[in-house]
Amino acid sequence: MLDKAVEYIKSKIEFNPEIGIILGSGLGELADEYCDLAISYSEIPGFEASTVSGHKGRLVFAEINGKKVVMMQGRFHFYEGHSIQKVVFPVKVMKKLGVKTLIVTNAAGGVNAEFKPSDLMIITDHINHMGVNPLIGLNDDSMGKRFPDMSEVYTPKYVELTEKIGEKLGIELQKGVYMAFTGPSYETPAEVKMARVIGADAVGMSTVPEAITASWAGMDVIGLSCICNSAAGVSTVGLSHEDVIKAANDAKDKFKKLVKEIIDEL
């Protein structure tokens, strides 16, 4: 199926992308702004339709600042009922298409009390609390090792680069650890307290499976979280997906500016 997906995509595009971007909830506008070619997920062998509001469900190809880029305008989530292998299938496709650097983004809840809605956080590390690993099963030795090192999933030199770009653009950036839960329910106050105790700064329902797979496959990874609300127990306000989309919308201009500059510097 992987070969079929790659073959189909290559029949539609005229270049091999070098940078991949996974656009999280409410952050898909970058793909609307830059779109040379878009392929609906429903057309690609092995891809699934996206069922979540804020995820258009398209693979978008574009040239941005002279770099060839492929963007997932919406992702597959484990909580939608997909197998974890299906969730990371597009990352494997990107690798086969030639992507060397993956920028993975998400909307997240702020566990760190100093974070506020619409902040952008550079992911420095993650905690996998999803109870599953995307590398379980037969290993594809042509793509990655059976027992990959996860010491530096989020490429340190690009964490530093993103910090410097934020300073140059005048964008205040947070840094921290992202903890992935399965969802689709938001975390309880007790779960958020646990997350804080074990070292998380933000929580969400995605990103970690894709980052593990990309690192395993030898890709550099840059992780960005849009802090869209304060997680349960940090704030007394209830949580809703509508609030997530609104906060992402408030942050979209600085998010696009940051990502475009990152692409320019890669």
Image (cartoon, rainbow, N blue to C red):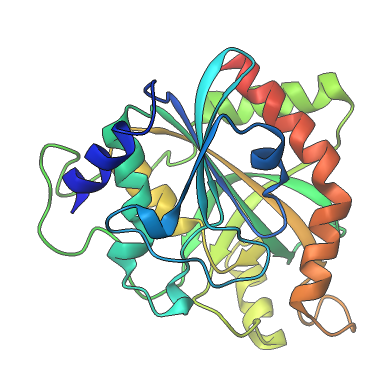
The part of the image, by quadrant, that contains residue 151 is top left
Q: How many marks?
A: 0
Locate residue 185: give its quadrant.
bottom right
Q: Can you say which quadrant of the picture contains the N terminus?
A: bottom left
Taking the image as shown, residue 211 lies to the left or right of residue 234, namely: left
List x then y, in percent, for residue 260. 69, 26
Residue 155 percent location from the top left of the image: 48, 32
Residue at 43%, 38% in the rendered image = 152
| Relative to 118, 17 lies left or right | left
Between 249 and 102, which is closer to the camera in this rendering?
Answer: 249
Asked which quadrant contains residue 234, the reply is bottom right
Residue 240 image point, x, y percent: 78, 80
Please give the name of the residue rendered at 79% of the width and 81% of the height, measured from the top-left corner.
239
Asked if residue 114 is positioned above or below residue 256 in the image, the reply reads below
User: Would residue 133 be seen by someone viewing this image from the given angle?
Assistant: no
The reply, left or right, for residue 73 in relation to residue 27 is left
The reply to whether residue 4 is visible in this rendering is yes
Query: Residue 87: x, y in percent?
Result: 38, 62
Q: Quadrant of the C terminus?
A: top right
Q: Residue at x 54, y 72 (%)?
A: 51
Residue 1 vertical placement versus 141 (above, below): below
Residue that appears at 74% across and 75% down: 241
